[in-house]
Every structure is written in C-alpha cells, then in structure tokens.
C-alpha cells in the first residue's frame, strides 16, 4: 500500500511532499514512487498517529472498571479521533479493584479493536491527601513497591504517578524507575522536595499545574522544579479549562518542543454530553464540557488530544511543537519511540491523514485503515 502525493511530517518533523510505502503494518519506505499505484492524498497532510498516555475513559467506559469491553470502547473511541495508541489510566482505588482493572487491560492487549495499548498509567494511590483532586481520599496510601510489583506482574506499568514528598516516595522512585517512568503527581511538594525527587528517579510530571503546588515568587513549587530540570517531561491538559491558554504558551516556551506532552486525562464523559458521571467511585458533574466534583473541584476532562492539538494551534503554539507533544514526546515517556511516534522507515504505520482544514480524513493503525 502506498500513500501518495501528501505533505509528510517526517522523521525530523519538517514537512515535505513524499509518498509512504507500507508493508506488513510497517513503513517500508518514504520517497517518490511515481510508477507505483497508491491512494492519492493530494492536498493532504500526513502526521504520526497521536498517543494518549493519560486517559481514564470515554463513552461511559472507564479504565478502572475491570471490564474488558469498556477498554475496547475506549480503544475504538480513540481511533475514531486520531489517537492510535494509549495507556489506560487507573485511579486511587483498593488493590483488589486495581487488580481487576489490570486484568481487564491485559486481556485486551494484542486484541484491541482500535487504538492499541502500551501498558498502564498508574495514577495513585500513592499521592498527597492535600492535593488529591478528584481522587478518593479513603484509598490513598503510602508508596508500596511490593504492591507495584504485584500489579506490574499482571499488566505492564508504563507510568507510576506518585507524590514525591510522601514518606518512602524517593525510595519507591529509585526502585521502580528501573521498570517504568515515575511521575510527580497530586503533590504538595515544595520546590526543594520536587527537585530531590527529580534527582532520585522522577523524570516526569502529571498534568502540570493541576493538583500540585503553584508557582509563587518565594515558593517556586513543583512546576518550577520541572522547568529547571532539562531532562524532565511534563503533561499538559490543553482543553482551555484546566489551563489558561497563556499558561500553555508559557509552558511550551519553557519546556521547548521536546519536553511537553499533551494528554487528555479524559473520563467516561468524553464523547458524551453534559450530565452526571462517575470517576474513581465519586460522582462527577459535567456542565458545558467542564467536569467537577460536587464541591466544585475540577475533575478529569471530556476532551481528546486531537481536539487539544487544534486548540493549541488556536492558542498560538507552533505546529511542530504541538505535533511533537502529541506524538514522539509521549512515545519517549513510555518507551515506545523505537517503534512509533514518528514517520520513519521501519516504524509502525500509525498515521493520520488530515485535509486542508486539518480535519481527519484517514486513520491508519499498524497499516490498517480505521477511518
């Protein structure tokens, strides 16, 4: 199969008019194949498939449900919206509930009906009570390497999101960072405590600015610790509700084009309308697309990262920076960049074809056309 006559954002994330030859689900070659038949996408743009490494749910389905069909619902929803792979993300829940969730995700891996799964993003339960956000307080507990290992045996964990200031967090990070990426999340850490974490196994920050200490002139907080560490990557929710566009412009400016990672952090209300939903055992109220708890605490989002990508362009973020934040950057965070995240010879043919208005025209996952 050959995708012909499109503008391709290739390996170096620069646009060039090329053809893409696909064989056995992989990109066989990128060039000009004038004498070979293919699908003409003149006037279109081809970019890597988007990767969402932090998503709780969509279309009434929840990653923590323990129900494999709900994982498939999320997989299909994502593929329809240009996301070709993802990390189902669990909440702060009892280990018994997490075990069932991990088993359901594992059951789907390799059999996905849409976007494919890299592994699990384990958000909590090792977080700060003071910055729990929409996580359930009664299930928060101290970092436990043995619990992590038990769950990781069931299904691979690609991200472990914990509060670096909690007792045992640094020791936990040192141990599990050999297995997965460790992320500062739902944290009351000071700048100094966060820096200590980044010196001892932490390399990532979960939904930057949300559920963490803020930037203040004499108390720089977690975000400044992230900005100060040239190796740290950071998630950004770009729905225009969790972070003001000016904050996103600042973040992209400070992080550069290689450290920003767009996530949805979406819940079961994504793809649905306003109403009442559940997240981590708590009721969430969605009004005008904004999800909150009863006390007004902002909860997860109802968006997807393709919509967020277009938001970023409207907010004034450079196309290349926004694109990398949805593709190769999240791939690197979860160790998937050797086989996806960019359009390169030998990588999976996870591709999006966009029309002149940047709307989805086709979605390819492992070379198979989904949309």
Image (cartoon, rainbow, N blue to C red):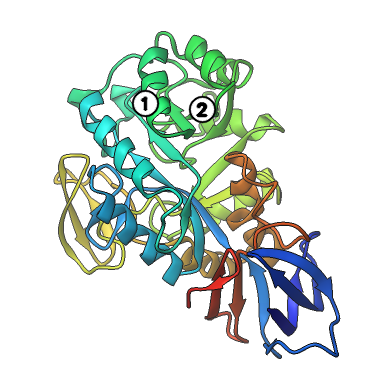
Q: Which mark is residue 221?
A: 2
User: Residue 103: percent from the left, percent from the top?
Assistant: 31, 37
Q: Is residue 228 left or right of residue 149?
A: right
Other residues around mark 1 within 10 Å, as few (<14) / some (14–19) / many (≥20): many
Residue 61's place in the image compared with 145, above or below, is below
CA gap between label 1 and label 2 equals 31 Å
Residue 98's place in the image compared with 112, above or below, is above
* Residue name at image x 33 percent, y 14 percent: 142
Q: Is residue 129 left or right of residue 34?
A: left
Res 215 visible: yes
Q: Nearer the viewer, residue 140 or 150?
A: 150
Residue 154's place in the image compared with 13, above or below, is above
User: Residue 12: percent from the left, percent from the top?
Assistant: 81, 59
User: Residue 172: percent from the left, percent from the top?
Assistant: 48, 14
* Residue name at image x 61 percent, y 54 percent: 325
Res 193 visible: no
Sequence-wise first label, 1 or 2: 1
Badge 2 marks a residue whose secondary structure is helix
Other residues around mark 2 within 10 Å, as few (<14) / some (14–19) / many (≥20): many
Q: Across the whole image, how many numbered discs are drawn on residues?
A: 2
Nearer the viewer's eye, disc 1 or disc 2? 1
Q: Which mark is residue 151?
A: 1
User: Residue 154: percent from the left, percent from the top?
Assistant: 38, 30
In the rendered image, the quadrant that contains the N terminus is bottom right
Badge 1 marks a residue whose secondary structure is helix
Q: Nearer the viewer, residue 359 or 298?
A: 359
Residues marked 1 and 2 touching at CB (< 8 Å): no
Q: Which mark is residue 38?
A: none
Tell me where residue 163 sits by quadrant.
top left
Extreme front residue here? 24
* Residue name at image x 42 percent, y 71 percent: 80
* Residue name at image x 51 percent, y 61 percent: 84
């Amino acid at each position: 199969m050959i995708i012909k006559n499109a503008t391709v954002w290739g390996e170096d994330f620069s646009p060039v008019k090329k053809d893409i030859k696909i064989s056995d689900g992989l990109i066989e070659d990128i060039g000009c194949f004038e004498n070979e038949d293919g699908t003409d996408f003149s006037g279109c743009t081809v970019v890597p498939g988007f990767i969402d490494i932090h998503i709780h749910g969509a279309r009434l389905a929840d990653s923590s449900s323990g129900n494999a069909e709900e994982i498939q619902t999320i997989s299909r929803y994502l593929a329809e919206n240009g996301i070709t792979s993802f990390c189902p993300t669990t909440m702060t829940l009892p280990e018994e509930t997490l075990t069932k969730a991990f088993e359901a995700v594992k059951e789907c891996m390799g059999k996905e009906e849409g976007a494919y799964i890299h592994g699990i993003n384990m958000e909590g339960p090792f977080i700060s009570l003071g910055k729990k956000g929409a996580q359930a307080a009664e299930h928060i507990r101290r970092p436990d390497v043995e619990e992590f290992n038990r769950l990781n045996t069931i299904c691979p964990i690609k991200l472990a999101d914990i509060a670096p200031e909690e007792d045992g967090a640094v020791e936990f990070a040192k141990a599990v960072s050999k297995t997965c990426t460790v992320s500062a999340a739902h944290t009351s850490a000071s700048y100094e405590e966060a820096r200590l974490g980044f010196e001892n196994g932490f390399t990532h920050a979960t939904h930057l600015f949300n559920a963490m200490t803020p930037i203040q002139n004499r108390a720089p907080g977690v975000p400044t610790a992230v900005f100060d560490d040239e190796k740290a990557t950071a998630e950004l929710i770009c729905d225009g509700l969790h972070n003001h566009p000016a904050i996103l412009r600042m973040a992209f400016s400070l992080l550069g084009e290689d450290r920003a990672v767009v996530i949805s952090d979406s819940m079961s209300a994504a793809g649905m309308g306003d109403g009442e939903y559940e997240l981590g055992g708590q009721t969430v109220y969605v009004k005008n697309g904004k999800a909150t708890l009863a006390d007004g605490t902002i909860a997860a989002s109802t968006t997807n990262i393709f919509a967020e990508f277009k938001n970023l362009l409207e907010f004034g973020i450079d196309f290349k920076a926004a694109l990398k934040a949805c593709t190769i950057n999240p791939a690197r965070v979860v160790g998937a960049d050797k086989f996806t995240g960019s359009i390169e010879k030998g990588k999976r043919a996870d591709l999006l074809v966009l029309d002149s208005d940047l709307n989805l025209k086709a979605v390819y996952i492992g070379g198979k056309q989904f949309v």
